[in-house]
Image (tube, helix red, strand yellow):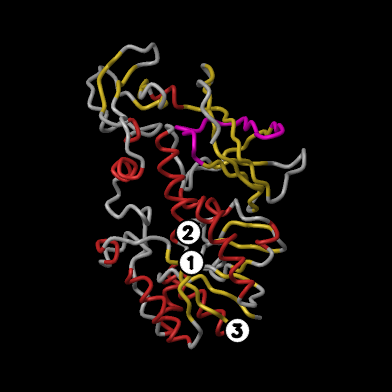
């Protein structure tokens, strides 16, 4: 079978390609050039990806494996779909997830289409997840599971996707890299947003979407407690960096972008018992009797829930409180180890009442 292997230049995608070659597949390595990474992103600090060193590593691994290698320039598509989207949503007081957006729009849409033009029957990546019959499942190693970021993939694309590492642990993957003689065997993992090498999200937003964002820090009654220089420097649940003194700890409860206000309050107001989400994407809709669990962040606990679906949104009633559900974040729904789908949080509420409306995401 001809398979396009998405090669980021890291150890995971390198091993995924290597294992497919060992299995006898006709593998083509493709590296996506997504942005012009500053030099610091190519310095091998282990925190970032997509720099020049990563492209060179992907090319070297392909040469070692004896497979064709291409660089696919997706900079303009990445800017529109991921970078602009990230900045715009922060300007609207939301907390977006660029990895979810990248997977849904680029890797498993545009790249999948390009793979077909190369005559490939499937696309393989180094993600830790499993797929079978057009359905998506968690990785065997839950500490490495990346299924949370993959829910936007369409079922027809999933049927043509391979995740060779889905049943492995990281040490096993590095062992394969050593055995195959790959230069990425001991390469550190990238951990941060790839297009923000200094990890300063607010600075990126200021540069990408400049505008006045200074305002007040207020309590839920509107009493001014302090001031800030940029509301997009804050996210729901944040405690540190508020710059205000109070008898009890205060946390960010919500962000009012229209008024440039950051609303703070006690931790109890972050115990959310339900969320409303839109931009709903189903891989498989659950039955009425199926036990469904919701995960509100990548490393978050999976919480049993009830679903009330409408035409363009879904209300997720949590059977246990979840802390700090931020508008713009993804909520992903599971049945056992199967990913049913996901959506983007629009608003959340506590036992004490609902949060105000937020703009559609």
Q: Secondary structure at mark 2?
A: loop
Q: Secondary structure at mark 1?
A: loop
In the foreground, 273 or 88: 88
285 w.r.t. 150: above or below: above
156 w.r.t. 58: above or below: above
Local crowd at mark 3 within 10 Å, few (<14), some, or many (≥20)? some
CA–CA distance between discs 2 and 3?
28 Å
Q: Residue at x 41, y 79 (%)?
A: 59
The residue under label 1 is 169
What label does residue 255 carry, if any?
none
In the foreground, 89 or 241: 89
The residue under label 2 is 144
The N terminus: image quadrant: bottom right
Q: Which segment did they paint magenta?
A: 308-329
The first of marks 1 and 2 along the sequence is: 2
Left or right of 103 on screen, residue 204: left
Q: How far from the left and from the top, in percent, is residue 85?
A: 46, 45
Local crowd at mark 1 within 10 Å, few (<14), some, or many (≥20)? some
State which mark lies toward you, 1 or 3: 3
Q: How far from the left and from the top, in percent, is residue 144?
A: 47, 59
Q: Secondary structure at mark 3?
A: strand
């Amino acid at each position: 079978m001809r398979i396009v292997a998405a090669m980021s230049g890291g150890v995971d995608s390198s091993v995924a390609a290597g294992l497919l070659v060992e299995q006898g597949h006709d593998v083509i390595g493709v590296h996506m050039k997504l942005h012009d990474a500053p030099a610091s992103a190519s310095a091998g600090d282990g925190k970032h990806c997509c720099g020049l060193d990563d492209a060179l590593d992907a090319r070297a691994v392909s040469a070692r494996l004896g497979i064709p290698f291409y660089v696919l320039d997706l900079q303009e598509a990445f800017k529109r779909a991921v970078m602009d989207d990230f900045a715009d949503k922060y300007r609207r007081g939301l907390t977006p997830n660029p990895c979810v957006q990248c997977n849904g729009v680029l890797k498993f849409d545009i790249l999948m289409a390009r793979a077909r033009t190369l005559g490939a029957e499937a696309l393989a990546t180094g993600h830790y997840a499993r797929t079978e019959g057009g359905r998506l499942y968690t990785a065997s190693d839950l500490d490495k599971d990346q299924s949370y970021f993959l829910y936007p993939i369409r079922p027809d694309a999933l049927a043509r996707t391979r995740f060779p590492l889905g049943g492995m642990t990281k040490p096993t993957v590095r062992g394969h890299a050593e055995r195959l003689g790959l230069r990425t065997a001991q390469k550190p993992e990238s951990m941060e947003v790839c297009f923000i090498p200094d990890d300063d999200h607010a600075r990126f937003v200021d540069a990408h979407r400049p505008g006045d964002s200074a305002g007040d820090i207020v309590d839920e009654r509107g009493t001014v407690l302090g001031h800030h220089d940029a509301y997009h420097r804050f996210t729901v649940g944040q405690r540190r960096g508020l710059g205000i003194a109070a008898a009890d700890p205060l946390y960010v409860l919500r962000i009012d972008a229209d008024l440039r206000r950051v609303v703070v309050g006690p931790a109890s107001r972050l115990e959310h018992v339900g969320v409303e989400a839109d931009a709903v994407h189903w891989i498989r809709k659950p039955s009425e009797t199926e036990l469904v669990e919701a995960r509100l962040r990548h490393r978050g606990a999976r919480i049993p829930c009830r679903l009330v679906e409408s035409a363009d949104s879904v209300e997720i009633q949590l059977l246990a409180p979840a802390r700090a559900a931020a508008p713009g974040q993804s909520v992903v729904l599971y049945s056992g180890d199967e990913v049913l789908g996901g959506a983007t949080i629009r608003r959340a509420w506590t036992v004490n009442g609902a949060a105000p409306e937020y703009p559609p995401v």
